[in-house]
Image (spheres, rainbow, N blue to C red):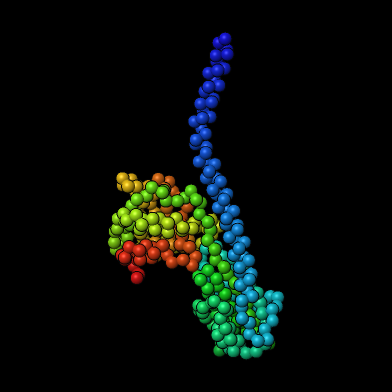
Amino acid sequence: MKRLLLYAVLAAALCASVALAWPRAKPVAAKHAAAVGAKSVAAKREHAAAVAARHLLHEFVAPPGASRTQRPSGYGGVLLRPGPWPQGEVAHRFGFWRVTGSFVPVVDYVRSHRPPGFRFSSESRSSLGQTPRSAVVSFRRHGTRFLNVTVVRLPGRIVIRVDALVAWNYPRSPHEKVPATVAEVDIIARMVTRHVTDAAQVDRIVSWFDALPVVPPHLGLICVTPTRSTIKLIFRSASGEQLASASGPAERAFGCDPFGFSVHRARMAPLVDGVGDQAFVYRVQRLLGVRLTDRP
């Protein structure tokens, strides 16, 4: 009888320990599922960007007589990454064209024939002595599509390399959001401090902040210490309790200078401004009608 009573006590203790452990295990499982879901979304976005980059190559307006070719001999990899290269996750495809003719007219043709929907971004040229050797003409569309056209003079021919770049945002875990009970946002910048309590403005600021993507996990950067002004946000409940906080640059946030973000004082993944979007700080500045940045 004593032995049966002992077994019953042990069984009850085991059940109690499982019951206590289960609520703690559930958030861990949810967080793991969210991370897996984010990776799945990232894979889909990466694939879509790669397809878009491949199609983008066909939008290049080649000079008359130019023909597609394989990587030409003697090219030597002149300017492997020419022109503007967006920060963050980028799908990259490139191709080569070959054309006969003079260097300067070919460059002029490329510059004056923008692909549909693109705008001219920049141009640079390099020379070997008095002889122009290469030129880079760059076009962009919506801040997420780039065509960098490199014209290279080689013996007896002109080679054109076209780099198609499509930027995409790495997704953010749905669990790393500002708590829904936020009723006030305190904004502290170098030039001004604001306590935002208007419900519509609070909702707008929170929605913008929740839309910021995370710093891509595989982004390799060599960074120096940022010297830009900073801004701090404190998200509070109606009673004034601090629910979340963030701090970052009072300009566009990028991989080397992101927003640090904490919820209930637990650190979340750092955040950056989305590719092609106006920076978060500038949108808040315009919404509130105050100066939060060093620049207008």
- Residue at 36% across / 57% down in the picture? 200
Give the number of marks: 0
> Where is residue 252 drawn, in percent x and y?
42, 65
Q: Is residue 182 visible?
A: yes
The quadrant of the picture occupied by the C terminus is: bottom left
Q: Is residue 249 left or right of residue 94?
A: left
- Direction top: furthest residue: 1
In this orientation, which residue lies closer to the viewer: 196 or 137? 196
In this orientation, which residue lies closer to the viewer: 150 or 7? 7
> Where is residue 105 drawn, in percent x and y?
59, 89
Q: Is residue 276 left or right of residue 159?
A: left
Q: Within the image, what quadrant is residue 194 found in?
A: bottom left
- Residue at 36% across / 60% down in the picture? 230
In this orientation, which residue lies closer to the viewer: 84 or 24? 24
- Residue at 53% across / 56% down in the picture? 171
- Residue at 38% across / 51% down in the picture? 245
Say if 21 sits above or below 189 in the image. above
- Direction front: furthest residue: 200
> Where is residue 157 drawn, in percent x and y?
67, 85
The quadrant of the picture occupied by the N terminus is: top right
> Where is residue 206 drawn, in percent x and y?
40, 55
Say if 285 sits above or below 77 in the image. above
In this orientation, which residue lies closer to the viewer: 191 or 235? 235
Q: Is residue 73 visible?
A: no
Say if 144 sits above or below 135 in the image. above
